[in-house]
Amino acid sequence: MSEQSKPEQGRSKQGAGKRGAAKRTATERNTTELARLHVKKTYKLYVGGKFPRSESGRSYAVTGPDGAELANAALASRKDARDAVTAARKAHRAWAAQTAYLRGQILYRAAEMLEGRAGQFTEELSAATGKEPHETLGTVEAAIDRLVHYAGWTDKFASVLGGANPVAGPFFNHTKPEPLGVVAVFAPQDDPLLGLVEAIAPAIATGNAVVVVASEAKPLAALSFAEVLATSDLPGGVVNLLSGKVAEIAPHLAGHEDVNGIDLGGVEDAALAAELEATAAGTLKVVRRPGTAGSSLDALRRWVEYKTVWHPAGMAAGVGGGY
Amino acid sequence: MFEYAPAPESVRPRIRDHYGLFIDGKFVDAADGSTFKSVNPADESTLFTVAEAGEADVAAAVEAARRAHESVWGSMSGAERGKYLFRIARLLQERAREFAVAESIDNGKPIKETRDFDVPTAAQHFFYHAGWADKLAYAVPGGPEPRPLGVVGQIIPWNFPLLMLSWKVAPALACGNTVVLKPAETTPLTALMFAELCREADLPPGVVNILPGAGATGEALVHSPVDKIAFTGSTAVGRSIAKAVAGSSKRLTLELGGKAANIVYDDAPIDQAVEGIVNGIFFNQGHVCCAGSRLLVQESIAEDVLARLKERVATLRLGDPLDKNTDIGAVNSAAQLKRIADLTATGEAEGAEVWQPECALPERGFWFRPTVFTGVQQSMRIAREEIFGPVLSVLTFRTPDEAIAKANNTPYGLSAGIWTEQGSKILWTAERLRAGVVWANTFNQFDAASPFGGVKESGYGREGGRQGLEAYLDV
């Protein structure tokens, strides 16, 4: 046990050191290793468990804070958003029907996968935000810990939020939270990994499927996080990730008849957020307005609604009413 | 069938000729002098006139509620707030018969229902929530003691006027909010009697304000500087309210329409199921958002169930709401009667087979015979739209999967019913139904301790139970 945990405990410092070394070799690479051509990654969407390009064929350049081009990301279209909703709806029922224990294990598995790739995410976050690697490593570790936290919630929130109701009659009466279904999530713009995890984890822990629009300017960590989810036994379609322009995609998700909830947390333009909320009213979606925060239980409660089941408990109590 | 001698209720409540708005603990007329009249739907006679609140009155009421929240109610200890609510519950119990008769007269529903259901359940809601007032820290786990929202605007429908008032007012007050409530324009009477009762209970002025009026009054309330809107009514109005509060900081809970499936499996206890079907759709003339208006019966027993259902429906007594033997009273208004008649006509036009028992209708007033449609297809309007009347659409299914698919094939998701003797089938079915409330081997049960509310286009938020408090706390 101690042997296994030792390298884990030491990883953060060593990891940071290694990445410092990696930076140096990158400089050397330009001078001494010209023969080795760096293999760049193509960042694609994550829809229905697959990694497609935008059906529109479009992409946009993602730059770091200094303006240097980092990569191209797919520029998702209306059709991509609709495909993602279809994939989410298809995945939702089976995901919600899984045992809470299994959902917890899969979220924990995602934490394991993220831990294993902490170095990559630290670099991606540093490139995206300009922050020092030791700082972004802390963010990655916080994201891992949030996944672990929500992994432990899956088989507990229902007993905390629901329960038996002592009604004034001979009835068994029980309330439990159920997922809303499909939730469209606009991830925070300036917190591309931790904020993303904090938005996704409670929604899927409670059995929802999500369509997530990543941070518009900093989508790369989110698109890499899709690779973590894809290797965590999470069924395809439970989480779908889109990169692109919030203002372009959002109205289609807000107005989509098969979306049950919409998280406007990452919509920074207040006028757009108000407009999206008004659009969402057309199909009576549950809306999280920007700027609302709370405990993890608040986050879990946000995307559930309560179902109450009655059954007679007395032999003579067959039906109600006075007829 | 036995003939019953008339058994009219003898208690007659004192109904005034005119009621004002109840603002800041006083009855006042509308700033612009507007009034409207309330009609007895059983004989179309005018019962009383009542002031109609306009924008200025809404502003005055919201200001009064704000003052009351800031000066007395919001800072009062939970224990003291609770004692006011206990007192209100007791007064309602004491005056239960008077309220029941008044409700029956103003609404048209049978005295049997107001006496045995509406008024006792309303009192229970105050008694139940009174006990929460000093225990809110236990209601929402994981945080500090939750705070009230402030001033709440509440808009309620005409189908259960006093009961809907209690569902709204009791939790709001228990959580430390003050309220401005608009009763429905056709049924303001018991809300105004409740205002008198608040005075009798010495409730501080401004904690409860009652503003009779129609849609324009409700709209003014939605746009007023309240902290939250709670609405029970149609999905169409719910949508427009959700649009109106978009981009603001106003909270919103909505309890909207429904088109509940009542599923009868071939292993159901048939006699009980028939009673449940009748209760599900004919309770309160079918003016129930969670009414079991779509009967889904397994094909192999459909003929038997329908025969017994018609036999049972033929024994229902329609007539004087104040007669203690009446099962089906008057439809609440001429407008609602027209809507029911129009939708029923589309059912016939679209090819469904209509059946009604032969029963005499009173000459005056608004009446509609209990109606059963068979041969209904899912595409027909009578299978898709909320009729809000005593009209049942019967569809059949062959397998449990088909029952679930048909039951969920609606934008609504308020309630559903299941009839089978097999426990595992109940739980299997309940798990798959997209509805906020599921009644198994029973129907139309309500309790202050049991959360009520819908999913999908039936709205969001719960009323009743611990979960219902979330709607009135800053959580």
Image (spheres, grey):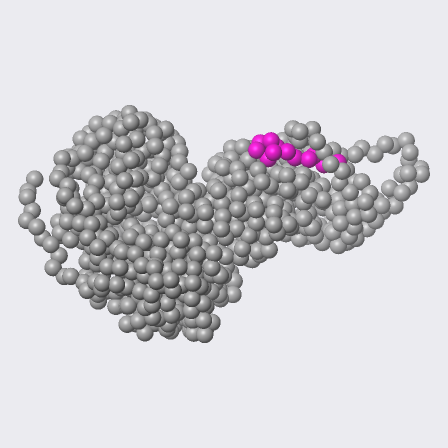
Please give left or right for residue B447 compared with residue B70 in the image: left
Please give left or right for residue B137 compared with residue B376 in the image: right
What is the x, y in percent for residue A74? 70, 34
B165 in the magenta segment = no
Residue at the spot 34% in from the left edge and 62% down from the top edge = B33
Residue A285 visible in the picture: no
Residue reaching furthest right? A31
Image quadrant assignment for residue B395: top left
A82 in the magenta segment = yes
What is the x, y in percent for residue A28? 91, 41
Image quadrant assignment for residue B248: bottom right
Residue at the spot 17% in from the left edge and 38% down from the top edge = B313
What is the x, y in percent for residue B334? 26, 45
Residue at the spot 39% in from the left edge and 49% down from the top edge = B255
Residue at the spot 29% in from the left edge and 52% down from the top edge = B186
Residue situated in front as seen by the camera: A122 or B436: B436
Residue situated in front as seen by the camera: B96 or B464: B96
Please give left or right for residue B110 compared with residue A302 in the image: left
- Residue A310 vs B197, above or below: the answer is above
Q: How many marks?
A: 0
- Residue A113 vs B170, above or below: the answer is above
Residue A293 visible in the picture: yes
Q: Which residues are magenta?
A: A72-83
What is the x, y in percent for residue A194? 66, 50
